[in-house]
Structures are given as C-alpha cells and as structure tokens.
Image: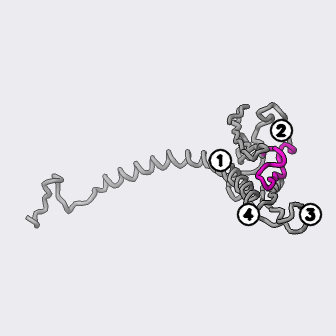
Amino acid sequence: MGNDKHNKYLGRFADNGFTLLEALLIMVIIGVLVAIIVPQVMQNLPRYRLKRATRDLISYMQNARLEAIKRNTNVRIIFNIAGDSYQARSSGPDPAWASGDEFDLFGAVNLADYGSGVAFGFGNAVNDWDSNALIGASHQTVLEYNNQGIAVATGSNFLENRDQTICYAVSTSLVGGKKLRFYNGMGGWSD
C-alpha cells in the first residue's frame, strides 16, 4: 500500500501541500500579530534600557566596593554628569589620591551606549523622596569606598531616558548598601 496516495490518518491526499488560501491566511495572522506586538515593544524599549543601565550601575558600584576590600585600598567611582559616563579608579597601594599610583579598575561606562537617550537626569521629578528640590548638585559626583568597603559619604545618582518622565535613583549608604528608587512620572517615588 506504499503507492496509495490517500493517507487514511489525515483524511486527504498525502502529497498535497498547503493551499494558497491557507498560506495567505497564515501570512495575515502573522502580520496582525507583528502589527500588535512591535509597537508595544518599541514603546517599552526605552524603559527596559533605562532599567538595565540602572542595574548595571548598581553592579558596578558593588564591584568597586569589593575591589576596595580585595585590594585593601580606596576605590572611587567618578561620575561625569555632563558627559553621561562613570569610571572606577583605585588609589593604588598608597591610599593618598595624589601619589601618582592611581589606576583605572574597570572600563568607563558611557550611558549613551544603552540607547534610548539614557543619561544622568531627574526625569520630570522636581523633588526627591524626602521632598528636597532636585537640582544639578543633587547628583553624587564621586563615590569613594575605603579598604573596608565603607563609603566615605552618602549620595544618590539619578538616571533618565529620552522620555524624561520616569527616572531611577541609586542611593548609597555609609556601609556600602545600595537603595534603588523609581520615580513613576506622576509625582511619586517607590522603593
């Protein structure tokens, strides 16, 4: 029965393929799905990139803190707010910063590399979570950890995307802990 063109399991001829109507119907269904999904992804892409940049900043801070402990030296993260970048430097064996033995620990991070206009900024927030006015000086420009991983000073850095409605704030405590806050674009901060 190998020559029998009728497949009793399918109830139709086995050597027939899809009809033109079936192929067109599949193409229409795929087109409709693409038309629905692509705009949603494109709309949410700036938010996803901003969230990724914020998570990477937290990881970078944690790695800098661990390097300070591991190398038994001071480590600074220098934030170039105007240039939308940051970089970690070690004080070297001598904890003094002007001794000439400083070196870069990790490569510089340029926020523009994330795309979608990710940059240092406050979004449309005018106050922080404690109702303090946000101005350019609200950004932390240097975060320094000593050889025990303790931050020399507390501070926050704010990241926004091209929409400039939402933003994330990464705050550092003296013991080196990080706190992430989200500004929803409508006047409220959440942890």
Q: Tell me what residue is drawn at x 84 percent, y 35 percent.
A: 133
Q: Tell me what residue is drawn at x 76 percent, y 38 percent.
A: 124
Q: Single out the mark in the foreground, 3 or 2.
A: 3
- Tell me if residue 149 is in the magenta stretch: yes
Residue 171, position as x, y percentages in the image: 76, 43
Q: Which residue is mark 3?
A: 98
Quarter of the image for residue 97 reads: bottom right
> Looking at this rendering, what residue extends furthest in the bottom direction?
101
The magenta-colored residue range is 136-156
The amino acid at mark 1 is Lys
Label 1 close to label 4 by CB (< 8 Å): no
Q: Which residue is at the front of the view, 36 or 134?
A: 134
The amino acid at mark 3 is Ala
- Tell me if I can see residue 99 in this picture: yes
User: Which of the two labelled residues, at mark 3 and mark 1, occupies the earlier sequence position?
Assistant: 1
User: Which of the two labelled residues, at mark 4 and mark 2, occupies the earlier sequence position?
Assistant: 4
